[in-house]
Image: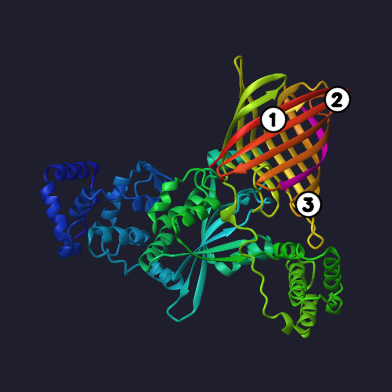
Amino acid sequence: MTQTPWSAAQRNRCRAGLKKGSFLASLLFLWLPAWGSSFSAEELIQIALHKRLYESPTWSALTHSDNSKARIRKSPFLLTGNRFSPESELVETITVLYADEQQSERKCRYPARNQWISEQLGIEPASLQHCRELTEYLAKAPVDEVILVYASENLSQPSSIMGHILIKIAGFDAAGHRREHAVSFFTDVQGINVPKIVYDSLVAGKNGYFTLSPYEKKIAAYLAGEQRNVWEYRLALTGAERKLVQLHIWELKNANPTYYFDGYNCATLTNYVLATANPNLLERGSYLMSPLDVVRNVHQNGMIENVVVLPSNKWKIRMISETLSPATNRAIKTSVNDIDASELPRMPSNEEQFLVRSLAETYNDYLVETNVRTSEAWTVYTRQLNAQSRSDHEAYVIDVSQYKNPLKAAKDGQWQIGFARAGGDNYLKVGLLPISHTLSDDNRQFFSETELRLADISILINDEDVELNELQLYSASSYLPRSRFTGGLSGAFRFGIEPHYNDRLERKLAGNVSGGLGTTFEPVEQVSIFTMLTLGLGYRAGSAYLYTAPEVGVIVDEAMQMKTILSVSRTFGQIDQDDSYTSINLRQSARFSGTYAVTIDGTYFTSHGDGNLEFSAALKYLF
């Protein structure tokens, strides 16, 4: 006989009954393992509420909720929708599993909840044998391994400027075939309307896409298509934990989550999925979670069993070429471009000869991946390389595991407090950068010197006033050293409110949208020399204006975790069309303990013989 779901009044009477008759509830709890699922849904709900299963962090992970706030409010993922509470969702879930008709399709949506609730109550799970699609999924997507996958940052795609995180599930099916799938959550960011993109990503939300796809295609897109590096972290999970992850992935297939850059992104969803196996992952909180936060989270919880680094060919070229002389690199490039392996230089040691051959192979692969070389030309050069003897260096391999390590990257949030002098007055300066890092921070684990600031705000305070110093809604820059093999441009983009200056060096806040292109060279290790031409649009006091700012500078990573940035720029057309001024900026930072840093920032402005100095010194806390 079909049982009808409970009303709110019935649930309240049940809770009251439990309070008055806790002895009866305790007896029911003791008898559950023996009597199993012969209990009615009402009785199972009484026991589940008595055990307060809705307070379990695993239930929070299964419902993607935090402090009773659901991150996915859409049906069918949540049975209670906008009426969500952990308690009511638990009651409705048990009702569906144990009060619906035996062949109910609704049961098929919640296999992970079914597994977990039955384990907590000590009963047999509700039968899902009629769920054909679920059975097919379990057969085609085995989970003998759960691997966390981090793809490095991609500044050309706003949704991946902090990298991307996903889950790889792998295993052997019943026929003995190995199957690998990528479990990924992302959004589509198109267009050049930056204010709309920012508003949609942070406030309105964007359509999110949750996919289960062949891993081979996903990894090829990262490595060959986008030339991004990938780290695979195999997680130490038990069979039961892997099973729960597998079942929960099924529950998300029709969830259609809304994507928020700050509140529910690829990192947030991935952390919830893994938290079904290890609820301790939820202790970090879900707000402002980045892909690197997930990597750090599983590392701090001792879940990483093994690490595999998959470098893109563009990265391998840069890494290997750094170990060889300029003359050797020129000869290798000539050999590959001429499709003549006989032009490769002969080196005095087997190790160096191995590096020469490896660089030639990698550069040849890179050219065909980027459609610069045809597959026929690639085949010809590959055959030439294979025809050469390699017995003298077969024992060598390139270890890239520690060349760049995401776990060593600086934390991607910070606040600061310090002294500032601006516009002729002294201030207390307070700032918050909730998402990512500045150029002055430690960028040695990134592919290049980078800056990414989202919602970066600072204010100035003195006895007479509190005023906005700067608000960068979105600011990104990359100073990628130009490679002999792969080229490379540097670029920058800013959108926000910032100080602009006229030729009298008067400081005025203005709305700003600007972009720049340039080149960066690395004459010696840890020293980058750059040039950048910026074009910008400013707006203040009801007037808009175009301006330009050519800039040249040097970035030096020094010993003892110190860093110096010196730049000189000439700005034309800010505020008034005929205005121009020169600015010399010096930034010095020192990091210690991985959590704190001290920064000193000074800019000297000069125009028509007049000069003005702005200066700040601050203590940073990284989080």
Picture quarter containing residue 396? bottom right
Q: Which residue carries the number 2 mark?
A: 607
Residue positioned 69% across, 30% down in the render: 498
What is the residue that sits farthest to the front in this orientation? 560
Q: Position of residue 464 (x, y in %)?
A: 61, 14
- In this rendered view, identify the residue nearer to me: 483 or 410: 410
Callout 2, which amino acid?
Ser
Query: Residue 418 at x, y = what percent?
Result: 61, 29
| Residue span colored magenta | 544-557
Q: How is the image coloured?
A: rainbow
The kind of residue on which mark 1 rests is: Glu
Mark 3 vs mark 2: in front:
2
Up the image or down, 574 lies above or below 301; here it is: above
Q: Going by the image, does 544 lie left or right of 129?
A: right
Magenta region, main secondary structure = strand
Which residue has dot 1 on it? 498
Q: Nearer the viewer, residue 149 or 115?
A: 149
**Residue plotted at (65% across, 35% down):** 472
In the visual, does 22 lie left or right of 360?
A: left
Answer few, some or many: residues within 10 Å of disc 1's Cα (few below 14, many 20 plus, some between 14 and 19).
many
Q: CA distance from mark 3 to mark 2?
A: 31 Å
- List the residue tagged with mark 3: 489
Q: Residue sitting at 82 percent across and 72 percent down?
A: 336
Compared across the picture, whether 571 is left or right of 440 comes to: right
Which amino acid is tagged 3? Leu
